[in-house]
Amino acid sequence: MWELRVSPEFEGDYKKLCSRNAGFKRAVDAKVDQILENPMPYKPRRAPLQGVRRVHVGGSFVLLFEPKSELGAVRLLRLAHHDEAYGV
């Protein structure tokens, strides 16, 4: 299992989107657990987001994360609507 690291941007996104929606919070938490098991099968992004991977959560929302295999860690970067997520 990989170590979890969280960016300040993700923390803010998570609090904002999950505070009033328990179903969405469960979906995000389940997806994070899957990512920590094995982050490599998820779709990698191209430049300028090289090294970042993404997965859709709850339809229109995207979770961006960065696996660091040399550290055995996954850093969660953003949780946002698809239209806003790629402004990292």
Image: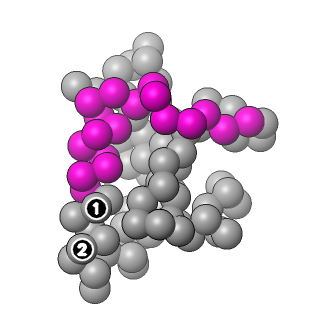
The stretch of residues the image draws in magenta is 29-46
The residue at the far bottom in this view is 20
Q: Is residue 88 shown above or below 22?
A: above
Eyeballing the image, is 42 above or below 24?
above
- Residue at point 42%, 59% (across, down): 57
Residue 71: quadrant of the picture: top left
Q: Furthest-right residue in view?
A: 47
Decide if residue 82 is on the left or right side of residue 62: right
Residue 27's disc number: 1
In percent of the image, x 53 and y 45: which residue is there? 54
How many marks are shown on the rendered structure? Answer: 2
At label 2, the amino acid type is: Gly
Coordinates of residue 41 in the picture (x, y in percent): 46, 28
Secondary structure of the residue carrying tag 2 is: helix
Image height check: is 64 above or below 74? below
Marks 1 and 2 sit apart, C-alpha to C-alpha, by 6 Å
Q: Residue furthest front?
A: 59
Taking 26 as reference, is 55 left or right?
Answer: right
* Residue 7 point in image, percent of width and height: 44, 51
Residue 74 screen position, x and y as percent: 39, 34
**Residue shown at 35% from the left, 21% from the top:** 72
Kindly identify the amino acid type of the residue bearing the numbered disc 1.
Ala
Q: Which residue is mark 2?
A: 23
Q: Is residue 71 magenta?
A: no
Q: Position of residue 18 (x, y in %)?
A: 31, 74
Tell me, yes or no, whether the highlighted magenta stretch contains residue 44.
yes
Q: Mark 1 touching mark 2, by CB under 8 A?
A: yes
